[in-house]
Image (tube, rainbow, N blue to C red):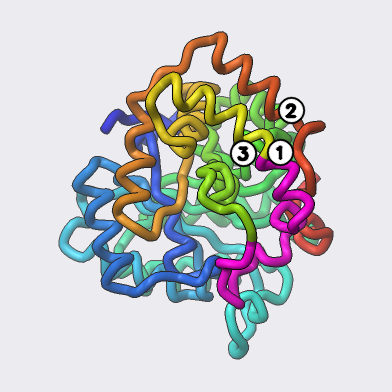
Amino acid sequence: MKTRYLGKDKFQVSALGLGCMGMSFAYGGAEESEAINTIHAAVDLGVTFLDSAEVYGPYDNEVLVGKAIKGIRDKVQIATKFGFRILPSGHGLERMAGVDSRPEHIREAVEGSLKRLNIETIDLLYQHRVDPSVPVEDVVGTMADLIKEGKVRHIGLSEVSADTLRRACKVYPITAVQTEYSLWTREPEESILNACRELGVGFVPYSPLGRGFLTGKITDSSGFGEDDFRRNLPRFQKAAMQKNQQLLGQLQDVADKYRCSLAQLALAWVMSKGDDIVPIPGARKIAHLQDNAGAVSLNLSDSDIKFVDHVFTPDNIQGQRYNQGDFNLIDK
């Protein structure tokens, strides 16, 4: 597996990461043994950049990752996130009760993450969502203190605006920004991607496969479990999916040319946008993980990249990526 570097501090990670959220949250989860086997298979393939968060579960995903990396800590880079207020009872998304990035809460969250992951230091700690009531300068200052204390190695921000990122970088170097970016989510190209490059910040796209849609294997939502949050997303409603599937037909023509899967093509497209980009597709099954890993060695021609760009312009995509309530948590 090739590697890439994030940020001015040259944080070296596998060129493709693994988003672990879906193993225990949002998409119905997976059996613990299967999820652990998938993480082990990822490491064997050289996919060593593992992404989690305290809110995934909540908490369950960090516990899962902690079990999976026991004995192989020196082979992986662990990213996790804080920033939500989590209720003591309820199920899944019901326990998310807004944002909380007060310095004292950040410290509590980090101590909890270290314990659940069973590690001494978090390789990359993100603020999951901006807290409007806490200046980003205070947030980054607290995260920088955690670096000095040896509890964190690098820091990042998620779904952050360019202006907020610029303010943050004045306090301490930001290693990476994590934001949704894929063929059908092109908003980062408007501002934040350029800001990252201006400031020497790496870029980590989550959901680079459009929450599975860009693999071509999801034709309707009937196969989603009752607790799969895609059921309520605008892009996964029937009319939107039918419209967006027409675009996949054109993508398939390009995939056929390269004798690759749609997933590999979608990931290769994201990676073609810069060596400072490290996507973190999720995978609950080893077969999907192996397929995704094949994207790293796929080199698309400039003409094919431009063709795909043209097919998947924002105007051609039907439906928003989130509901309005979720958009309220996005820093603008």
Residue at 47% from the left image edge and 27% from the top image edge: 255
Residue at 27% from the left image edge and 49% from the top image edge: 42
Identify whether 171 is placed above or below 97: above
Q: Which of marks 2 and 1 is in front?
A: 2
Secondary structure under tag 2 reads loop
Amino acid at pointer 2: Thr
Query: Is residue 327 shown to the viewer in this render?
Result: yes
Identify whether 57 is placed above or below 50: below
Residue density around tag 2, few if under 14, some if 14–19, many if 20 or more, within 10 Å: few
Q: For this view, does 190 lie left or right of residue 111?
A: right
Amino acid at pointer 1: Arg
Q: Earlier in the sequence, mark 3 or mark 1?
A: 1
The residue that disc 1 covers is: 167
Tell me where residue 200 sits by quadrant: top right
Q: Distance between the residues labelled 2 and 1?
A: 30 Å
Q: How far apart are marks 3 and 2 (CA)?
A: 13 Å
Q: Which secondary structure dominates the residues rendered in magenta?
A: helix
Identify whether 24 is placed above or below 12: below
Q: For this view, does 237 lie left or right of residue 197?
A: right
Front-most of 317 and 221?
221
Q: What stretch is highlighted in magenta?
A: 221-245
Q: List the single residue furthest toward the left.
A: 71
Residue 15 coordinates in the image, percent (x, y): 37, 33
Q: Which of marks 3 and 2 is nearer the N terminus?
A: 3
Residue 158 coordinates in the image, percent (x, y): 62, 48
Question: Does the segment drawn in magenta span residue 234?
Answer: yes
Residue 307 coordinates in the image, percent (x, y): 63, 17
Secondary structure under tag 1 reads helix
Secondary structure under tag 3 reads loop
Question: Does the segment drawn in magenta span residue 307?
Answer: no
The residue that disc 2 covers is: 313
The residue that disc 3 covers is: 181
